[in-house]
Amino acid sequence: MDVSQMSPNEMEQQLQHAVEEHRRFTTDGEVANYIPKLGSANPKTLGITVTMMDGTSFTAGDCDAYFTMQSISKIVSLLLALQDIGPERVFDKVGKEPTGDPFNSIVKLETIKPSRPLNPMINAGAIAVTSMIAGKDNPEKLERLLQLARRLTNDTSVNVNKEVYLSEKSTADRNRALAYFMRENGIIHGDVEDILDLYFRQCAIEVTCSHLAYMGAVLANRGKDPITSEKIVPEDLARIVKTFMVTCGMYNASGAFAIDVGIPAKSGVSGGIMSAVPNRMGIGVIGPALDKHGNSVGGLRLLETLSREWQLSIF
Ligand code: GLU
């Protein structure tokens, strides 16, 4: 089916149909609760927004539901750190390789010599990336992160959800362990609690699937705003993050996702998925019920169907 030939009505109808069709899969998953506040999300929520290369958006389902970016924020922090200190210095400390381990795994940090997180999409790598963001103090660094997030989502009101941030901060022993281990090994420097505080706030940036679709559209449009054509991030950096989205964006299910869906995408444990279909569209999805890898069950099914029907796979 040629999406570019579809009328806005047809497009919206297809999306609505797809959401209703796939909502039943949400009962196959569970809402994350290791961050206690995330546990209160409604598992039946399912919503989608598609933003085209001219900025036109189509939505269906629970597209007004707010949720926190969680791991999707790793894309924002990586883009900022890459702009701040350049790819060479970022990738001196954090690798470019996928991992078959869960997102919060500690095991490879110890077995790889010299110690280095495998990539910026797992927690260890993302915490290291956050530690590279420029700024005189945490409030300034957070402001810079928020500014980029607001430009990527085309909404100046995007902000941190304080309750989710505090909920993670008070329960994040695993991330603390990763960070202290990395400081001992010279991957990060300075005050670990400060670095983690910024990381928890970045993960708690609150959005809807429409924000994620816009962000995907900017990346799909090689770093340019789809409406104004203004450059938000350099093209080569947009290319780097899209490549990470393909190789490690969907946790340790990224290989299966590349085969079944075939588009650059990044998911988060709150159930969001941000996808960028190069030169075609951005897609934002929310569905808080997760599979065992931490990916939205309803969201995965939706993307799989749309990719097949609209021939979105880049492969
Ligand atoms: N804030 C979450 C954590 O560090 C993000 C994890 C995720 O979304 O994958 O555990």
Image: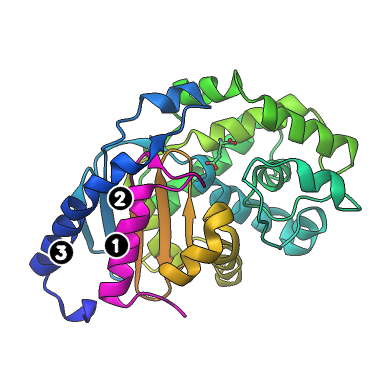
Q: Which span of residues is magenta-colored?
A: 286-315
Q: Position of residue 298 (x, y in %)?
A: 32, 49
Amino acid on which disc 1 is placed = Thr
Answer with the quarter of the image where residue 201 lies: top right
Q: CA distance from mark 2 to mark 1?
A: 8 Å
* Quadrant including the N terminus: bottom left
10 Å crowding of disc 1: few (<14), some (14-19), many (20+):
many
Is 289 part of what is drawn in magenta? Answer: yes
Name the amino acid type tagged 2.
Ser
Colour scheme employed for the rendering of this structure: rainbow
Q: Which residue is mark 3?
A: 14
Q: Residue at x 73, y 44 (%)?
A: 128
Tell me the mark number nearer the camera, choosing from 3 and 2: 3
Q: Seen from this angle, which residue lies furthest front?
A: 28
| Residue 120 percent coordinates (x, y) | 66, 52
Neighbor class of circle 2 (other Cα within 10 Å; few <14, some 14-19, many 20+) is many
Numbered label tally: 3
Chain-order first, disc 1 or disc 3: 3
Please report whichever mark, 3 or 2, sits nearer to the chain's N-terminal start: 3
Position of 282 with respect to 232 (left or right) is: left
Residue located 55% across and 65% down the image: 255
Report the amino acid beneath label 3. Gln
Question: Of helix, strand and loop, which one carries label 3?
Answer: helix
Name the element at disc 1: strand
Task: Name the mark on residue 210.
Answer: 2
Relative depth, front residue between 29 and 195: 29
**Quarter containing ligand 1?**
top right
